Image: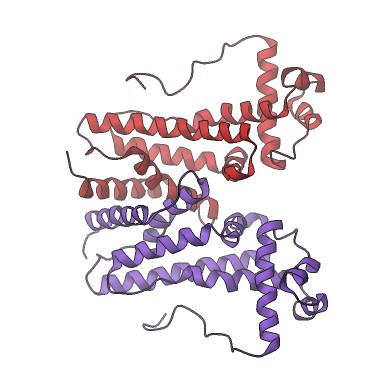
Chain colours: A red, B purple
Amino acid sequence: MANGTPDRPPARRPGGRNARVRAQILAATVELVARDGIAGFRYEEVAEFAGVHKTSVYRNWPDREELVVEALLRYAEDLASIADTGDIHRDLADFLLALAGGLETPFGRTLEQALQPARQSPAVQAALGRILDQRVAAMRRRVDAAVHRGELPPVDSSFLGEMISGPVHLIVNRGVRPFTRADAERIVGVVLAGLRATTPSA
Amino acid sequence: MANGTPDRPPARRPGGRNARVRAQILAATVELVARDGIAGFRYEEVAEFAGVHKTSVYRNWPDREELVVEALLRYAEDLASIADTGDIHRDLADFLLALAGGLETPFGRTLEQALQPARQSPAVQAALGRILDQRVAAMRRRVDAAVHRGELPPVDSSFLGEMISGPVHLIVNRGVRPFTRADAERIVGVVLAGLRATTPSA
């Protein structure tokens, strides 16, 4: 949580063949979990999609749940990042556009379904909890920086995150219309104006 | 859309035995669709849950899809209503609390899952579209009344609906914490203040 700590964990070592194989397997797992659900995907198909031998999947992930958890975590990293250009309005609008784009992918849809935590095993619940925590922490760092610079009054960043992300989930999940930059700008504009009007500037 | 039109369609005639049987069947269908999904529920179990003979289900709804659609529409009516006490803040906060309560029921969860329209048949998609339209229309009537009385600037009621409902869906679906009246008040407060600050008062 120290200032200047990057949002992401350290990059994985760009190791040789096994690192490539593992990455291919994780990518295939994400696709298949999106298609068949956490309980439904099959190792045979993961191997086929990844273009590797089935024994490579079993050797790297003897435990099915660990495979799911690692795939979820790896692919969720990108969705959690929020840039800091010094302009909180712009950075939050960009974040909402990236969030909407992420929710429209097969993986994003999976995550939305999976985020009904009661249905999941404890290991998957824990992974989902970590994904959520990463997002909340990224939001807090970005909002704290804006408060520190006087761009915002001292707002509750987790509430701010819910206020701007909620409408994005609703619009994308309904699928009635595409989510646009104008939507992102308008949502951020109303929420920041509302928070400025209702938060004492302590 | 004329002023004074009530939110609901005319009440069904409180007819005799068959009306009661039909109501029991629809209630059982909602429960079972919530448990087993639109594709998974079985007529035998609907009859058992409803405490009626299987032939009653087949006779009233020879078409499985019509049964689902009628059950969805009937149970969605209650979720769409918004009171008009003359205080827009209070009425919207009450609406959000009712929405959260509805989303937490088995039927609400079903509707959330079902609202991924791409997965549904055209008949079910059309029913979901009607449910959504009812909610949007109820919101428009209530917001228009507030604008007319000068409580609000001329805002886009459909955007207002997304802004206040989105966070409710997010909080309830995540299930990390209960949705409270304080949440409802805070959401409505920020959105109304934000809209007042950003909407020209025409």
Relative to A192, say whether A9 is above or below. Answer: above
**Residue A179 visible somewhere in the drawing:** no
User: Taking B108 as reference, is A20 left or right?
Assistant: right
Q: Residue at x 21, y 39 (%)?
A: A153
Relative to A151, say whether B1 is above or below. Answer: below
Outermost residue toward the front in this view: B51
Relative to A96, say whether B149 is above or below. Answer: below
Please tell me which residue lies in front, B45 or B57. B45
**Where in the figure is residue B1, as x and y percent of width and height?**
42, 79
User: Taking B144 as reference, is B172 left or right?
Assistant: right
* Quadrant the C terminus of chain A occupies: top left
* Quadrant the N terminus of chain A occupies: top left
Name the quadrant containing residue B180.
bottom left
**Residue B8 visible somewhere in the drawing:** yes
Please tell me which residue lies in front, A153 or B185. B185
**Where in the figure is residue B82, as x and y percent of width and height?**
40, 71
**Where in the figure is residue B141, as x and y percent of width and height?**
37, 73
Name the quadrant containing residue B115.
bottom right
Q: Residue at x 23, y 74 (%)?
A: B149
